[in-house]
């Protein structure tokens, strides 16, 4: 992995994990797809039978270091949040301890970039202080895509995302720490030699990929553009929680093709640990290659 980083450093901060049946998470995945996956990735929870295979997601953040900036990418579910889904309700995880163990105090974070505004990507944006939700990172600018910011102001079909918007997004706007930006947005330096957001609409309307590159490969923090390695073989299969399934599939295929062509390192939000991988064209779609495994 190190030879791809150039002047960048990347850390992962873990909150926890989750599981559901493969044929619920990704309806349409076949035995043949799982067999293709088996050539480069497997775990005891997987099976060639989609009805038996377990779909496992890690829930993590990344901290990217670039030119003296500490950039938090996605902020998991957060502690003590009231949520109408059990997997995010009143969590007390070791996320903050993990962050600090790696040398980052909350005041050391300069930028918070959310790939989208779902509840499992914004939670640690805020913490409870004297009964109020306040920004966890007092010195940070927080960057949100305008399309998600507008969408989650009115969406009602997933209450937990609405709850997250109210206690983990709006308090940051209230303190003046939020920058609401277009989905294609330059954050630092220039495209190809800096830090920039790229439109990745589909999983949510304002989904973005966070790209970083400084003398090495392009690092593509994919958020929820892709949830599981089997989707490298079948980018055309929608995740059950994709807001717009066909758009999410088209975006996934387009961004995987870009990564296959430029050799980008993919760092998806929910991939198994360690998550860094590359993709290669293979038949109609792609195959994968882990970068930090033996
Ligand atoms: Zn997610």
Image (tube, rainbow, N blue to C red):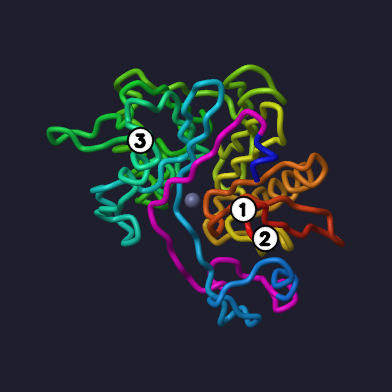
- Which one is earlier in the sequence, the residue at label 1 or at label 3? 3
**Mark 1 vs mark 2, CA separation in Å:** 7 Å
Residue 32 is tagged as: none
User: Which residue is nearer to you in this view: 90 or 99?
Assistant: 99
User: Which residue is nearer to you in this view: 269 or 289?
Assistant: 289
Tell whether circle 3 marks a residue whose Cβ is less than 8 angstroms from ligand 1: no
Q: How many marks?
A: 3
Q: Residue at x 52, y 54 (%)?
A: 270
Q: Residue at x 75, y 44 (%)?
A: 259
**Mark 2 vs mark 3, CA separation in Å:** 29 Å
Residue 168 x, y percent position in the rendering: 33, 37
Q: Which residue is mark 3?
A: 125
Which residue reaches farthest right?
283
Task: Judge the density around disc 2: few (<14), some (14-19), many (≥20) Cα neighbours within 10 Å.
Answer: many
Residue 231 is tagged as: 2
Image vertical order of residue 157 relative to residue 52, above or below: above
User: Which residue is nearer to you in this view: 232 or 180?
Assistant: 232
Q: Determine if the magenta segment contains residue 270.
A: no
- Magenta stretch? 6-34
Tell whether circle 2 marks a residue whose Cβ is less than 8 angstroms from ligand 1: no
Which type of secondary structure does the marked residue at label 2 adopt? Answer: helix
Q: Which residue is mark 1?
A: 226
């Amino acid at each position: 992995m190190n030879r791809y980083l150039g002047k960048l450093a990347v850390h992962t901060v873990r909150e926890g994990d989750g599981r559901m049946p493969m044929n619920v998470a990704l309806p349409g995945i076949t035995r043949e797809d799982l067999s293709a996956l088996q050539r480069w990735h497997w775990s005891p929870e997987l099976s060639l039978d989609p009805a038996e295979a377990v779909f496992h997601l890690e829930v993590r953040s990344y901290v990217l270091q670039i030119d003296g900036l500490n950039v938090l990418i996605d902020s998991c579910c957060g502690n003590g949040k009231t949520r109408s889904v059990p997997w995010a309700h009143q969590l007390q995880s070791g996320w903050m301890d993990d962050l600090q163990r790696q040398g980052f105090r909350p005041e050391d974070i300069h930028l918070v970039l959310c790939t989208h505004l779902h509840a499992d990507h914004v939670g640690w944006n805020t913490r409870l202080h004297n009964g109020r939700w306040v920004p966890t990172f007092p010195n940070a600018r927080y960057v949100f895509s305008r399309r998600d910011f507008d969408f989650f102001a009115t969406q009602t079909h997933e209450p937990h995302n609405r709850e997250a918007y109210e206690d983990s997004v709006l308090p940051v706007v209230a303190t003046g720490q939020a920058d609401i930006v277009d989905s294609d947005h330059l954050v630092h330096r220039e495209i190809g030699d800096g830090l920039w957001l790229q439109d990745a609409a589909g999983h949510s309307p304002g989904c973005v990929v966070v790209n970083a590159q400084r003398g090495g490969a392009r690092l593509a923090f994919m958020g929820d553009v892709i949830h599981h390695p089997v989707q490298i073989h079948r980018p055309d299969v929608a995740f059950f929680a994709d807001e717009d399934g066909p758009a999410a599939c088209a975006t996934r295929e387009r961004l995987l093709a870009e990564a296959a062509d430029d050799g980008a390192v993919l760092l998806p939000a929910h991939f198994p640990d360690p998550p860094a991988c590359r993709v290669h064209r293979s038949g109609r779609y792609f195959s994968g290659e882990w970068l930090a495994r033996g």
